[in-house]
Amino acid sequence: MKLICLGSGSSGNCYLLENNKECLVIEAGIPFREIKKALDFNISKIVGVICTHSHADHSGRVYEYESVGIPVFKPYEQTTRMAYWGGFEITAFDLTDRQGRFMHSNSDGSECPCYGFYITHPEMGSMVYATDCELIKWRFGSNISHILVEANYAADLIDPDAANRTHVLTGHMELQTTLDFLQANNNPELRTVTLCHLSERNSDEIRFVAEAEKVVDPGCRVVVAKKGIAVDVSLVPF
């Protein structure tokens, strides 16, 4: 099983969880044709698509999948919180603060319902994916094999006079918050951590990886989600 990044950031998000027979698409923020190319046009592998929230960089291309009959799991629009496709079992959890408020927002300032996913597969074990939030109140402990999580910015890298400072600070995860989440969920079974949705201006890939490596066990691989990267997320990697 591999986690393949096709896009991570405001220009469009999409990740593939793929083995020889199945593919789960995570986020539909880039054109479907790019997924087709990545799969050598074998789209029959796609068991389904999951999206965290309604913003275009995460779900703007949903209609392309739905138009060809590929199921899409959108917990922000649906009452169900679980999906079962092929060997994948997906559970959605709300990314709200401790008062139950969604932390991501729409352009008019209203709350944008946003969900994370707990994904399992016999070949992978388990993966937690969360993005576009200011904190993750849930703890998973020894039940996580892999983590795909936002590390959008570092507070000390933001220009205090930047016009978009408030936007950056609202609904996105700061490095220390990400590190706290990793430390709280570190366990001997954690094999990989993939840091995603890094800000172009307010992040530092080398620093973020180094800081994350300090809070997880030495055997855990830490990488940044960049277009084209493929991370081995097999339960038994060799």
Image: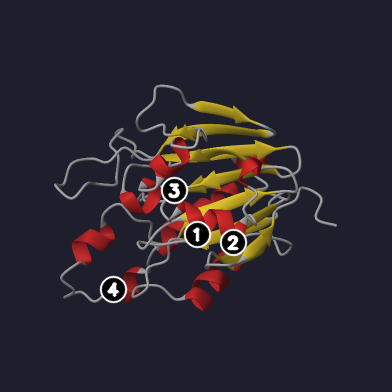
Q: Which mark sits nearer the N-terminus, 1 or 3?
A: 3
Whole-angstrom CA distance, mark 2 to mark 1, is: 7 Å
Horizontal arrangement in the rendering, residue 23 relative to residue 76 (left or right):
right
Whole-angstrom CA distance, mark 1 to mark 3, is: 27 Å
- Sort mark 4 into few (<14), some (14-19) or many (20+) by Cα contacts within 10 Å: some
Q: Which residue is mark 1?
A: 179
- Asked whether the residues under the numbered discs 1 and 3 touch, taking CB atoms below 8 Å apart as contact, a structural biologist would say no
Work out whether residue 61 or residue 124 is closer to the camera in this orientation and state it: 61
Whole-angstrom CA distance, mark 4 to mark 2, is: 23 Å
Q: Position of residue 99 (x, y in %)?
A: 29, 34
Q: Which residue is mark 2?
A: 215
Q: Position of residue 115 (x, y in %)?
A: 41, 39
Furthest residue to the right?
Answer: 238
Q: Which mark sits nearer the N-terminus, 4 or 2?
A: 4
- Sort mark 2 into few (<14), some (14-19) or many (20+) by Cα contacts within 10 Å: some
Q: Position of residue 39 (x, y in %)?
A: 63, 54
Helix, strand or loop at label 2? It is helix
- Asked whether the residues under the numbered discs 4 and 1 touch, taking CB atoms below 8 Å apart as contact, a structural biologist would say no
Work out whether residue 164 or residue 14 is closer to the camera in this orientation and state it: 14
Q: Which mark sits nearer the N-terminus, 2 or 1?
A: 1
Res. 28 mark = 3
